[in-house]
Image: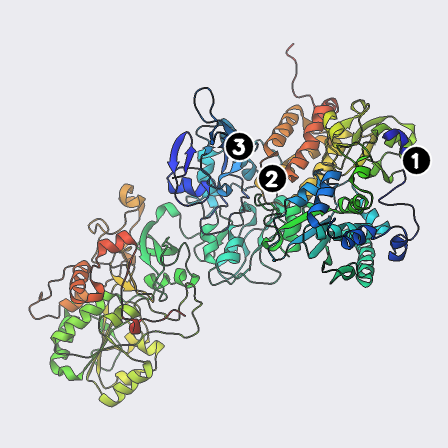
Amino acid sequence: MPEIFIDNKRYEYEKPGKVLQFMLDNGLDLPFFCYHPSLSIPANCRQCMVKAGMPVFDREKGTFETDENGDRVIRFFPKLMTACSLDLADGIVVHTHHTDDLVKQAQADNLEFILINHPLDCPICDQAGECPLQILTYKYGPEGSRFEHKKVHKPKAIQLGPRVILDAERCINCTRCVRFTDEISKSYQLSIISRGDKNYPMTANDQEFDDPYSLNTVDICPVGALTSADFRFRARVWEMNQTPSIDMSNGKGCSTWLWTRDNMVLRVTPRFNEEVNDHWMPDAGRLAYRKFNENRISRPHMRPDETEQVRTSWNNARLTLLEELEKVSPADILVIGSPHASVEDNYALRTCFSRLGVSKFLFVPHIESGSGDGFLITDDQAPNANGVRSLGFEETEGKALAKLIETKKPRLIAILDDDLIGRTDLTREHFSEAWTVVWGTNHNDTTQAADLVIPVTTAAEHAASYVNVDGRIQRTVPAKETMYTNRRLNLEMSMGRLDHYGTKFDNWVTDANRVDCIPAWEFLIRLEDDGAASGWESSRQIMEEIAKAFPAYREVSYDRMDEENGIQLKLEQDSEVKTA
Amino acid sequence: MSNNWKSYKPLLIPAIPDLHEISVYEKNNGYQALKKILKDRKTWSPANVVNEVKTANIRGRGGAGFNAGLKWSFMPEPDGEPRYLACNGDESEPGTFKDRKIFEFNPHQFIEGAIIAAYAMHVEVIYVYIRGEYRPFVQKLQKAIDQAYDKGYLGKKILGSDFSVEMHTHMGAGAYICGEESSLMESLEGKRGYPRVKPPFPAQRGLWGRPTTINNIETLANVPLVMNHGSDWYLEIGPSTHPGPVLYGISGHVNRPGVYEYPAGMNIMTLINEVAGGVRGGKKLKALIPGGSSTPPLRADMLEGVTMDADSLREAGSMMGTAGMVVLDEDTDIVELVWRISHFYDHESCGQCTPCREGTGWLEKTLRKMKDGNGEMRDLDLLLAICYRMEGRTICALADAAAWPVRYSIDRFRDEFEKKCKKTVYAVA
């Protein structure tokens, strides 16, 4: 197998590639700014300089030339090479800052150059704390600067587009953002303008940077030059907890990080997942975090008569629903599952109402034809259409559902978290002759029309699985507390710096932001006569049951989903929603 | 060779009226080399043309001085897909103004040379990249190209053979960096003029990812001479290590600045004193920049016996560059001059690589401070440190070009720099 020597240590490589990526794969450190594994390699930051050389091959003998000690004679390249663009070659010898003083010096020199025109406004910069320039300067940078002149001034706080703001002075011209729009989102909206130390990325005259993936440039920006208009000045990164999750805003289910503080989700960033979204995610999914914080239903709501909804206790809500269920025969109950709710919740709904004798379960996929782009935005607006379908829910359309209610006149309608009035052909009138119960996360037209509203947790508050348009099942992890969960007791919740080290004066939890809600399945098991027929204590157990009951879910478990970043299900061909 | 320079008859820009008209050029042995090649394709197979040019050792006139025929031989075997020849007429280095004379007075010789080069490398499309400021010369060249098309020297099936070639002109938008071969290609492709990382070299992956060769205008204008008279004849002109006629662009403090054509290897003092009429106002010579602003300046006392060819200049401590000689008299303020050169590179750095983007600006600011009389002794060390940190650490050679004049000027005129600096270090009494 071909070999490479890095800092006098031998490594073997299989596939051709570049030295920098090889070093990163092997956990070796080397500073860099412009390189990104998913983008082209411009080698323009000049930070990943290494000394490299090839062994001298003696063609006549057919062996490598050796010196008197029997070591290979190495012919070094006359100049330092950038590791990011240096090809792996059999026998290549690389010296990094660990073994070569010139390389160490070159890396410090380069950082000194980068910093001479950098404003060094870290205390007010959003990137501080997660800034490669800051980190690498501490690690590899010079002691101080010898630059005694006025720095170059460039435009600041320019609204490049609706979601991205540019501070040109902080820009180090790595061109990652430009390459992203050229190579990944293909909107070609950004370009470097001007020349020399005056250049910075910009859109064409009078053009907006309204790329649906524009916020990815904020993630890959190695400094605080591009910041999110939404997240700007909202929080310090070291005060937030970072929890792995998935995107709920469309059918692709991009892997994400939820960033929380004070039990509020403050931003969503993509999490690397080779199988789904690589390093990227659409802007819409990032801005969907508001749903986790705002307009939440807290405590059950019910409508005693034809008046306004009022808040009620959980016990009252449960008893009221049981009473109403007793009044009707199973044939008069219409149960509608939700592509917006998890596999577990839909399964619990189905199990619970099956016991009552209901045999027909419907759901309405949330498709907006033409909104997909074939990349990470799908026509499907819901994260779990395939999941609901695979559990045996019958697919229907808004119009057909309206007609069904008009003709069959069910006496009780149960709807799992889905704004059917808001997004389909249903109107309030369809609920007028039936008693309606809705499990909902946020107030919307449907919950307002209901007779009983059960507040349920969002993807940011519960552990649950979702099956994306390609049939891949992935799960969420609770990121924020509800009234009934506790970060310290629930070991699954991520612990941030303040959880570990904060005192009670650090104000990292305020009760105001805890929503009085529970997962839908937790309410559904309370409806059982004996209280614990299903015996579920966690969504993990529900998934174990599903895995036994449904062939498509065989071998699915939370542990495996965590380890493999989601599992590809073998769903029947005809039940798959095609990506746009 | 330099003794008989007085009897030398110009070959690149001969004194023939209206030579830019194709009829005049044809009367003066024009397009004969092309006809000769196309008439006898057996003797003059593309490989043989490359060999002939390689033997003639035409050293690239764009600054690097690389053997043009050798460069041509790097082109891979044709595979039926497009290949390109890009002619570099972007000359924007301060002190260089020679290619414009070819566009102005003898464009057909360049066109003929380019066609022969295209033939030798199986190229069917030639791009001529000309700096945007040369609008009148572009018009002249375009007229000449149109004439060549009319006469059948360009276009489909040239002179009845199966060899076809198209020639397009492309104007730059005023960027010095686009004279660097890889950013020239980026610019031709319609992109921002950022130099490319090498390898891959242009002959492997050039314009639109296809094999491409980039030659200077003057280099290509030499090709018909070699093909007409043979490489042996060509090697006789000037030193054999750097043969051929050279357009010396002499500017600065001389009585008769201008472009003069003489053999390579001319004695520098002869060029200054006899060709260019001596230093203006009878003053003493202080320094010479031999080949455009990026070449290290030479002190007057370093010029003894130095001739204008790559080897002699390297020995003297500089480079041939583009042979754009800038003559500086005794009144020249070297600090001001070096600042002006740095100012140019600061303005022209494309900003792609960190050391060049930031280093050129730092040099400029420090030199400005120094020329304004606010310099300090430690700034000299700082300037040298910046130069060392810029050299050899970037994608293209602009950082080197910006660093050399500063480094060598401080090296060679340190007393003048020190005079401009405040004495911040005092001897302990």
Chain for numbered disc 1: B
Helix, strand or loop status at disc 1: helix
What mark, if any, has residue B7 been given in the picture?
A: 1
**Circles 2 and 1 on the same subunit:** yes
Q: Is residue B48 above or below residue B286?
A: below
The percent coordinates of residue B302 (x first, y second) are 78, 23
**Residue type at numbered disc 2:** Glu
Taking the image as drawn, is residue B57 in sight?
no
Q: Residue at x 77, y 49 (%)?
A: B113
- Residue A321, compared with residue B207, is above or below; it is below
Q: Residue furthest left?
A: A530
- Residue A331, percent across and down? 16, 84
Task: Give percent across and percent down for residue A491.
Answer: 21, 49
| CB atoms of marks 2 and 1 within 8 Å | no
Question: What residue is rendered at 93% in x and 51% in y?
Answer: B17
Secondary structure of the residue carrying tag 2 is helix
| Residue bearing the label numbered 3 | A106
> Are dots 3 and 2 on a single chain?
no
Q: Earlier in the sequence, mark 2 or mark 1?
A: 1
Quarter of the image for the C terminus of chain B: give it: top right
Say which of A414 and B218 sits in front. B218
Inter-mark Cα distance, 1 to 3: 53 Å
Of all residues, the one furthest to the bottom in this rendering is A407
The vertical placement of A517 against B242, above or below, is below
Question: In this figure, which residue is indicated by the disc labeled 2?
Answer: B358
Q: What coloring was used for the rendering?
A: rainbow
Q: Is residue B164 left or right of residue B12?
A: left
